[in-house]
Image: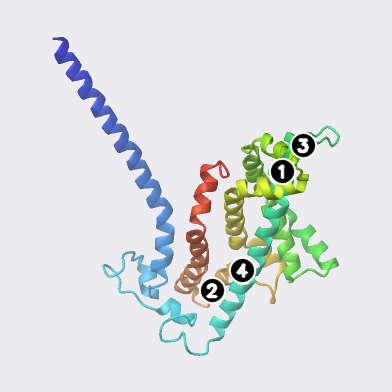
Amino acid sequence: MVRIDFEKYARGQRIRWWAMRLAVYGLLVIWAFVCVFPLFWTVSTSFKTAADVMRGNLIPWFNFSPSWLGWRSLGLSPDTIFQISTVRDEFMRRLWNSVIISVTASALAVVLGSLAAYGLSRFSYKFGHMRNSDISFFFLSQLIMPPVVLALPFLVLYKELALLDTYVGMIAVYTLMVLPIVVWIMRDQFATVPVELEEAALVDGLSVWGAFARIIVPLVLPGMVAAFLLALILCWNEYFFAALLTSTNTNTLPVMIASQTGSQGINWWSMAALSTAGILPLVIVGVVLEKHIIAGMTAGAVK
């Protein structure tokens, strides 16, 4: 009788184990579908005609035949890529603007944010009633404020300083935009490095800056790469300030994507083609930096 009860118990445990695994993997599959579907819709829409978009056809070669309509309207199809195209020239100019502004702002935010985070993780500060934890929360609280609140102040300030439609102005506002999240990421990263390593470096004759550059930075480099990529994504996709503070010289790619409207409404095929072309650089960066990103995430850089 005891043997039978044990077998029933073991069978019940196996059933519960498999049921739990099926539930977990089922939820992961559903979540993966939710995450991947917008990307699939964007890429597939770039190969649709107007009729296919209006009918809501989704699966290529099953309920619609792929077409180069969206890419041809941008001068990026195989039959137009080697021809003169003003739209393609405009796309390349906007893409270059996005690269310059996003990369520079992200790199600057990582440098400044790393220095601020290192200070918050190693030293004690006091500004009135504010301590380190209060200062850290102040940085994070900047993300709570909606960007539209800053529209008028930035517009007036940039007009007075002649920073409208300039690279310097856009880099400055993008750096301020992503700096809080970089500070929080890097603060947690520096907290994982033992203080004894710096003390040993100081005993060996290194200065504080020498210990930071030669000992600490190599250890937290994966976290810095992860923070840089996150800042780059936020800057690359930003639309509000790009539409508000630029006009002709420094317009970025999101502004061009949002402008794909005509007399018949939104040109979804052109917008999808532009969006797909705009996603590709981030995909390439992610593939190149994959090793560092995974290392940074496993080290606790991204939470």
The one of 10 and 95 positioned closer to us in this rendering: 10
User: Who's the residue at 22% across and 21% down the image?
Assistant: 10
Among numbered discs 4 and 2, the one appearing first in the sequence:
4
The residue under label 1 is 118
- What is the x, y in percent for residue 237? 58, 61
The residue under label 4 is 99
Q: Is residue 177 visible?
A: no
Whole-number angstrom distance, CA of label 2 to CA of label 3? 53 Å
Q: Secondary structure at mark 3?
A: loop
Amino acid type of the residue tagged 3 in the rendering? Phe
Q: Is residue 175 visible?
A: yes
Check disc 1: other Cα within 10 Å, few if <14, some if 14-19, many if 20+. Answer: many
The one of 3 and 89 positioned closer to us in this rendering: 3
The residue under label 2 is 261
Q: Are the residues at dot 2 and dot 1 in contact (C-beta closer than 8 Å)?
A: no
- What is the x, y in percent for residue 41? 40, 62
Whole-number angstrom distance, CA of label 1 to CA of label 3? 8 Å
Q: Are the residues at dot 1 and dot 3 in contact (C-beta closer than 8 Å)?
A: no
Q: Quadrant of the C terminus?
A: top right
The residue under label 3 is 123
Whole-number angstrom distance, CA of label 4 to CA of label 3? 35 Å
The one of 119 and 50 positioned closer to us in this rendering: 119
Whole-number angstrom distance, CA of label 4 to CA of label 2? 24 Å
In front: label 2 or label 3: 3
